[in-house]
Amino acid sequence: MDKNNKIPFDEDNYTHNINKNNERKLDRRGFMKTMVGAAGLFAVSTLPWGSIAATELMGLREKKYPKKEIIDVKKLNIGDAFEFAYPTDHDSALLIRLGENEYKAYQNACTHLRCPVFWEQSKSELVCPCHHGFFDVKTGSPTAGPPRRPLPEITIQVEAGKIVATGVKRYET
Amino acid sequence: MKRSYRGVILLCAVLFLNIIFTQKAIHQYYYEDYTATVIYAILNIILFPIALFIYHKEKNV
Ligand code: FES
């Protein structure tokens, strides 16, 4: 009884139980090391982009694109849009019929963060619902919202009553 | 002991450039400006030895 009522030892502060071992974990030098590591990380992370760009520069300047049928002209009314994939199955794209003989097609992954872009017929605009990005349907260039880069345009031909995709336009530099 | 924080500031600047170059490289890649992408990637890689050099110079001051 007596034993439990006593302060176990003489103490003059209330912080003796705080572990001080990690106190200097992130000191000046540790911070600088972290920064060097981060610089290394950035260097490595740009490598793949750089090397893909380099191979792109070396060989295929003019990329060859396959021809691909999209849809029958008759099935697409004026003012309507049709979703397809071009050039590969993973690149979703959007075909819009603007007039009797006026078609526009874009790869419709938003140039902001790659959400799919939709055709808003009532406003005659391409809309990205994710962060309210808007694109001009005639040129593909962004008109409002976060996107800065135009949508890549797909070249279109009409062959024997069918709409055919023939390639993806390069950006003019 | 009074420490010099020059190294810390310089490394912050290096990291800031890193961020800019990375952003630029990726944007230029999507713009299909591949020369620019390569240049930015190289700049980013060059920054790493510079960071190392700064660290070695400044770690004991
Ligand atoms: S992903 Fe389209 S606006 Fe952000």
Image (cartoon, coloured by chain):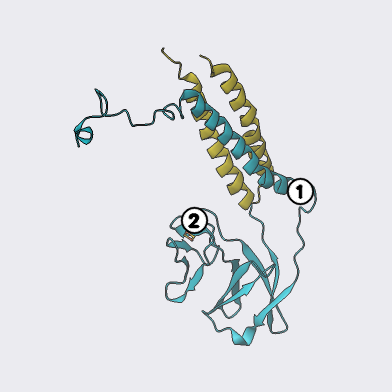
Give the vertical position of A139 relative to A118 (above or below): above
Q: In which quarter of the image is residue A149?
A: bottom right
Callout 2: SS: loop
Crowd tier of the residue under label 1, counting other residues whose Cα lies within 10 Å: few below 14, some 14–19, many 20 or above: few
The residue carrying mark 2 has its beta carbon less than 8 Å from ligand 1 = yes
Q: Which chain is yellow?
A: B
Q: Mark 2 lies on which chain?
A: A
Residue plotted at (59% across, 67% down): A106
Give the vertical position of B31 relative to A18 (above or below): below
> Residue B25 — which label?
none
Q: Is residue A173 visible?
A: no
> Residue A147 — which label?
2
Residue A126 percent across, percent down from the top left:
49, 68
Image hue for chain A: cyan
Crowd tier of the residue under label 2, counting other residues whose Cα lies within 10 Å: few below 14, some 14–19, many 20 or above: many
As measured in the structure, the alpha-carbon distance from the residue carrying label 1 to the one carrying label 2 is 27 Å
Residue A97 or A3: which is nearer the viewer? A3
Residue plotted at (60% across, 69% down): A93
Q: Which chain carries label 1?
A: A
Q: In which quarter of the image is residue B42?
A: top right
Give the amino acid type for the residue marked by disc 1 in the picture: Thr
Residue A141 percent across, percent down from the top left:
53, 59
Give the residue at the far bottom of this rendering. A74
